[in-house]
Amino acid sequence: MRIGDRAFEGRAAVVADPADADDGAARAAIAGKYGTTGLTTWLRTALPVAIQLERELGPEDGGDAGGVAGEPSDLAFGRRVDPNSST
């Protein structure tokens, strides 16, 4: 995944279970940031995708220099994750 001039290696997964805590967290984060005016149907029916960045790619990997290499983060929910975790 490329964000600006930085490239990352990672995984993406559809959050398919509405009972999953990540589903509620994703919808609440979007509603909190953008509000609900005109978005209520979209907030109920959108398909959340969790993107887990495992490491930043450097020039030797085909990525650009810059940033902090090896810092895992979870963009969808703003929490740090263990790249060795299966979740």
Image (cartoon, helix red, strand yellow):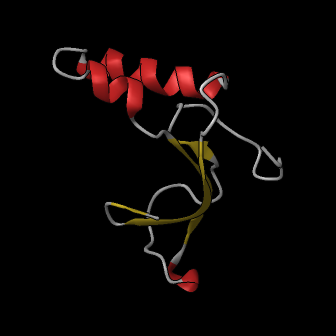
At x 83%, y 47%, the residue is 85
At x 48%, y 76%, the residue is 63
Q: Where is residue 80 in the image (x, y as percent from the top left)?
A: 65, 36
Q: Can residue 55 be seen in this view?
A: no
Task: Using the rendered view, name the quadrant where residue 81 is placed.
Answer: top right
Relative to 52, residue 78 above or below: above
Q: Can residue 68 be seen in this view?
A: yes
Near-viewer residue (87 or 61): 87
Relative to 60, residue 56 above or below: above
Identify the residue at the far left of this view.
Answer: 38
Q: Position of residue 16 (x, y in %)?
A: 60, 39
Near-viewer residue (20 or 69): 20
Count of marks overlaid on the render: 0
Relative to 78, residue 10 above or below: below
Residue 37 in the figure: left or right of residue 55: left
Q: Where is residue 49 in the image (x, y as percent from the top left)?
A: 51, 45
Near-viewer residue (15 or 86): 15
Residue 27 in the figure: left or right of residue 56: left
Relative to 9, residue 85 above or below: above
Location of the C terminus (image quadrant): top right
At x 44%, y 23%, the residue is 27
At x 30%, y 29%, the residue is 42
Near-viewer residue (45 or 65): 45
Task: Using the rendered view, name the quadrant where residue 3 is placed.
Answer: bottom left
